[in-house]
Amino acid sequence: MIRIVTVVLLIVLSLGPGLASAASSVKIGFVNSKVILEKAPQAVAANKRLEKEFSSRKASLEAKAKEIQALERKLAKDGVAMSESRRADLEHKILKKKRDLERAQDAFREDYTLRLNEELAKLQREVTRVIKEIAEQEHYDLILAENHVVYAAKRIDITDKILKRLSKSRK
């Protein structure tokens, strides 16, 4: 992306002084998406919603893991003194609980990822709306995000404007 912008600017600059002056009047903005994802009130609220939504499942998984650890400690401590069938039953119980935990963890991760992606998509739509609004109101010709930019001067960084607008739209 940066190569394309650089090549376009070089071509415009090489075509003549009239076009060069037009290129110098281009207004460019930069958005730091990482900062938006960390500081936007919508992102903070989404993280809190996800945490609340998934906290009981997470606690349940942690409790199951601790139960397995306790059974493994019991097997390590008392396994030698146990009868063969009792030890085999305990080993089977531990193995079954581990498999169940693994399936539950996989389901948890999938559900969490799905919800996270839903929340991120909502936030992205809102951020895009605010960026377009600022671009139109302040007559920007081009706005770039950091994953497409090698360098951006602070004077073209409009991240704070976007955060302020997102804060206002949240209220």
Image: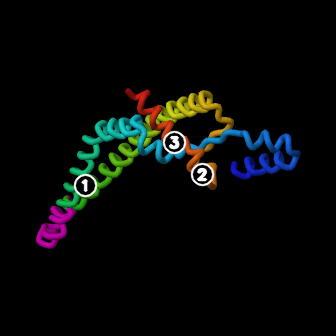
Q: Nearer the viewer, residue 44 or 86?
A: 44
Provide the secondary structure element on which disc 3 rests.
Answer: helix
Left or right: where 6 falls relative to 45:
right
Q: Nearer the viewer, residue 88 or 155?
A: 155
Residue at position x 41%, y 43% in the image: 39
Image location (x, y in percent) of residue 19: 83, 41
Image location (x, y in percent) of residue 150: 63, 55
Residue at position x 29%, y 38% in the image: 52
Colouring mode (rainbow / by chain / secondary structure / one colour): rainbow
Q: Mark 3 and mark 1: span between their CA atoms?
A: 42 Å
Q: Magenta region: which residues?
A: 72-89
Q: Amino acid at mark 2?
A: Ala
Mark seen at residue 153: 2
Q: Amino acid at mark 3?
A: Thr
> Is 165 one of the magenta-colored residues?
no
Viewer-nearest of labels 3 and 2?
A: 2
Q: Nearer the viewer, residue 95 or 114?
A: 114
Q: Mark 3 and mark 2: span between their CA atoms?
A: 12 Å
Mark seen at residue 7: none
Mark 3 near mark 1, Cβ–Cβ under 8 Å?
A: no
Tell me which label, 3 or 1, sits earlier in the chain. Answer: 1
Q: Is the residue marked by circle 1 packed among few (<14), some (14-19), or many (20+) residues within 10 Å?
A: some
Q: Is the residue marked by circle 3 packed among few (<14), some (14-19), or many (20+) residues within 10 Å?
A: many
Provide the secondary structure element on which disc 1 rests.
Answer: helix
State the predominant SS element of the stretch in magenta: helix
Residue 114: quarter of image: top left
- Residue with the mark numbered 1: 65
Mark seen at residue 159: 3
